[in-house]
Amino acid sequence: MDQGHEQGGAQKQAAQPSQGASRPRDGDEMSREEELLRVAASGTAYELWEVLPRGLLGRLFARGFNVDVRDARGDTALFHATRRGEAEMVRLLADYGADVSAQNRHGDTPLFLAAARGHVEVAVALSEYGAGATTRNSEGYTALHRAAGPEGRQSSPQIARLLLERGAEPNAKGSEGDTPLHVAASHGTFEVARVLITHGAKLNERDKKGRTPLQAAIRAGNFGVVDLLRGHGAQE
């Protein structure tokens, strides 16, 4: 787990760019913003430290600089850093004021990406900076649905537990009427299903096609989840 804000801030102050790290191009602030997106997508934390205007004078001279500038897909630098699992970058951006609740064109937030990809440290950092666990995207899905989803990382149960502790609704329904437990049942994410059940997921909730999580698990051939659900009294 990442260390706290004070130590993270101290690391930021102490960090120096490595030799040969790229610096922002000369030119207008849009060039600096483009560089911000590039570094977040493929650079290092040291390079990001270089790009962000530092200190009072740096911010004064960079007036108009937008840390939440978006690329063609609607993603900010914070999305790029989250996608890569770069917790240090995420903290640097959040310290600078990046919007941890920003939504892309699909309505996903950075926390959705962290949940889907199993980036625990990033999910913790985003949550500490105020990212909401109950946000829904354009199809009604939540980060908890993503944690239960097809990528099914080993760390996904930790993220599911974190989201639930932060107020995520275990029975939230997406556009197809499917809850996170339906998603876990369909994709065989056994440990996430176990976490959901212990946090109050409804075993016999039906989606828009009338299917329960147990039926979804049977249909997908995820018999470990089938046994888990039956063991807790689920019905078809």
Image: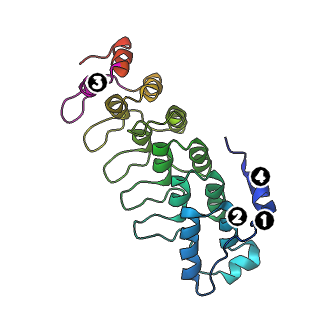
Return the disc, 4 or 3, that comes first in the chain's sequence: 4
Relative height, residue 182 to residue 50 (above, below): above
Confirm or deny contact between disc 1 and disc 2 (CB under 8 A).
yes
The residue identified by callout 3 is: 221
Q: CA distance from mark 4 to mark 3?
A: 48 Å
**Front in this rendered view, residue 55 or 217:** 217
Residue sticking out furthest to the front: 20
Image coordinates of residue 52 in percent, x first then y, are 66, 71
Colour convention of the picture: rainbow
Instruction: Specify the amino acid type for callout 2.
Output: Tyr
* Element under disc 4: helix
Return the disc, 1 or 4, that comes first in the chain's sequence: 4
* Element under disc 1: loop
For residue 6, the mark is 4
Q: Residue at x 37, y 21 (%)?
A: 225
Return the disc, 3 or 1, that comes first in the chain's sequence: 1
Image quadrant containing the N terminus: top right
Relative height, residue 116 to residue 221 (above, below): below
The residue identified by callout 1 is: 16
Image quadrant containing the C terminus: top left
Residue 99 shows up from this direction: no
Relative height, residue 88 to residue 164 (above, below): below
Instruction: Specify the amino acid type for callout 3.
Output: Gly
